[in-house]
């Protein structure tokens, strides 16, 4: 029997007896839950566009990751749905699961063999569904908590009611700020099209975006992000200013025990690509891991001037899937990713025994923080570059790691 593809909650079941309580709890609370037992069904659900929370069971924490990443790798050529991953683990693996969660490899975990907190799986799913912008379908309406409290004095109940009203008012005020920003961006777009002067209250924009702590209004935020990107891309396309390279910071060939940072070492090398020796006729394979769309577009545009095989990953999970299935000649890896930290990926790849353990990894960042630089190098990165990339820098990277510099005709 084929799985229901449009359900938002999916359980990958590996042991019917061990997973019975979790599945029963979910199906008693949510209207629609899909249970699958094969990687084939898991792949089908990944490529279906409906946003989902995947709860992956297993005899160990590595087993849950193996199931998920095998499925993710199998659908690497397809567009996958927006989703979150929860590992359902034995009690003895709780420490390992916590480290995976803190590193962003999984979105949450639950000790489910045996189950100690029966209803926590509901809270996990509801929280992650909110992040996905999904309206939760429950089997029954929840009773107001205030109405069920026993042995609480009327003045305490009154204080609780006032507190809830205040939270509601603050949310209403915040939503109005989002609407104002949306309108301001629309107005700025119209003025640009008419070649008029654009005025934006940048301080207000920063203030509003800085206080965002929840993904409950994710669709609205994505719409605003796209509008802001369109404005920035227009500015980049119409600007005739020379590239300012003074903000570029690089660190290369730093040993883990080094106490001094060699800033700009790679960039300052006096190399002439035209005088380099001929390289073998081999097209370099490069992986760019970057979630910022504008930075990614600029990097792709730059690398598309060369004969290269270019792969792109916008999340840490897709990067892991690519790095475990294909050998690369160079990896350009952003520090901050939506689902994990780039430094964690460096450590896993460089210190493992996989096919990319010796592939040079260059970290990309917008920060000059020395502690982050040092941590990246200690984890195995070969260099650290402040974005954006430039043509001369790409040439020097290719030269340093013996990659052929072949311009497209």
Image (spheres, rainbow, N blue to C red):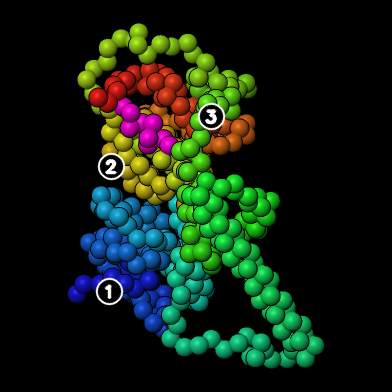
**Residue located 49% across and 19% down the image:** 266
Q: Which of 306 and 42 is in front in this view?
A: 306
Q: Closer to the camera: disc 2 or disc 3?
A: 3
Q: Is residue 303 magenta?
A: yes
Crowd tier of the residue under label 2, counting other residues whose Cα lies within 10 Å: few below 14, some 14–19, many 20 or above: some
Inspect this view and state whether residue 396 appears.
Answer: yes
Estimate the x, y position of residue 335 in percent, counting from the top left. Answer: 51, 40
CA separation, marks 2 and 3? 42 Å
Residue 398, x across and y down, in percent:
37, 22
Judged from the image, the secondary structure of the residue bearing numbered disc 2 is: loop
Q: The magenta stretch spans which residues? A: 298-306
Tell me, yes or no, if residue 384 can be seen here. Answer: no
Q: In which quarter of the image is residue 393?
A: top left
Residue at mark 1 to residue at mark 2: CA–CA distance: 29 Å
Asked if labels 3 and 1 touch by Cβ distance under 8 angstroms, the answer is no
- Sequence-wise, which precedes: disc 1 or disc 3? 1
381 up-or-down from 170: above or below: above
Mark 3, residues whose alpha carbon is within 10 Å: few (<14), some, or many (≥20)?
A: few
Q: Which callout, 1 or 3, points to the residue nearer the camera? A: 3
State the residue at coordinates (47%, 67%): 133
Q: Quadrant of the N terminus?
A: bottom left
Residue 241, labelled with which disc? 3
- Look at discs 1 and 2 and give the one toward the viewer: 1
Q: Mark 1 points at which residue?
A: 4
Dot 1: what SS? loop
| Marked residue nearer the N-terminal end (1 or 2) | 1
Which residue lies under the disc numbered 2?
325
């Amino acid at each position: 029997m084929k799985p229901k593809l449009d359900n938002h909650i999916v359980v990958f079941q590996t042991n019917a007896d061990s997973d019975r309580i979790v599945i029963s709890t979910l199906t008693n609370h949510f209207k629609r839950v899909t249970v699958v037992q094969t990687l084939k069904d898991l792949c089908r659900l990944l490529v279906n566009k409906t946003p989902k929370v995947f709860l992956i069971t297993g005899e160990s924490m590595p087993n849950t990751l193996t199931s998920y990443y095998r499925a993710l790798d199998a659908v690497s050529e397809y567009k996958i749905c927006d989703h979150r991953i929860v590992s359902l683990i034995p009690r003895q693996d709780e420490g390992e699961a916590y480290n995976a969660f803190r590193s962003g490899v999984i979105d949450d975990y639950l000790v489910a063999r045996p189950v100690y907190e029966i209803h926590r799986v509901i809270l996990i799913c509801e929280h992650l569904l909110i992040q996905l912008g999904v309206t939760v379908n429950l089997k029954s309406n929840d009773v107001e908590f205030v109405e069920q409290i026993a042995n609480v004095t009327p003045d305490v109940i009154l204080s609780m009611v006032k507190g809830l009203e205040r939270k509601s008012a603050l949310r209403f005020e915040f939503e109005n700020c989002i609407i104002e920003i949306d309108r301001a961006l629309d107005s700025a777009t119209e003025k640009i099209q008419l070649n008029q002067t654009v005025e934006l209250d940048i301080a207000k924009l920063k203030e509003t975006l800085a206080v965002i702590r929840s993904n409950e209004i994710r669709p609205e935020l994505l719409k605003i992000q796209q509008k802001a990107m369109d404005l920035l891309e227009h500015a980049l396309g119409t600007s005739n200013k020379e590239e300012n390279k003074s903000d570029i910071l690089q660190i290369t060939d730093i040993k883990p025990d080094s106490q001094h940072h060699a800033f700009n070492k790679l960039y300052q090398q006096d190399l002439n690509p035209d005088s380099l020796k001929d390289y073998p006729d081999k097209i370099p394979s490069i992986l760019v891991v970057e979630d910022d769309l504008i930075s990614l577009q600029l990097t792709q545009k730059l690398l598309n001037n060369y004969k290269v095989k270019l792969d792109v990953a916008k999340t840490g999970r897709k990067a892991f899937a690519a790095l475990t299935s294909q050998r690369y000649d160079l990896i350009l890896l952003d520090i901050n990713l939506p689902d994990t930290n780039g430094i964690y990926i460096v450590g896993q790849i460089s210190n493992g025994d996989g096919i990319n353990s010796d592939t040079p990894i260059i970290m990309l960042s917008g920060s000059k923080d020395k502690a982050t630089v040092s941590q990246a190098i200690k984890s195995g990165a070969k260099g650290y570059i402040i974005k954006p990339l430039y043509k001369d820098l790409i040439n020097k990277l290719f030269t340093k790691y013996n990659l052929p510099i072949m311009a497209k005709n």
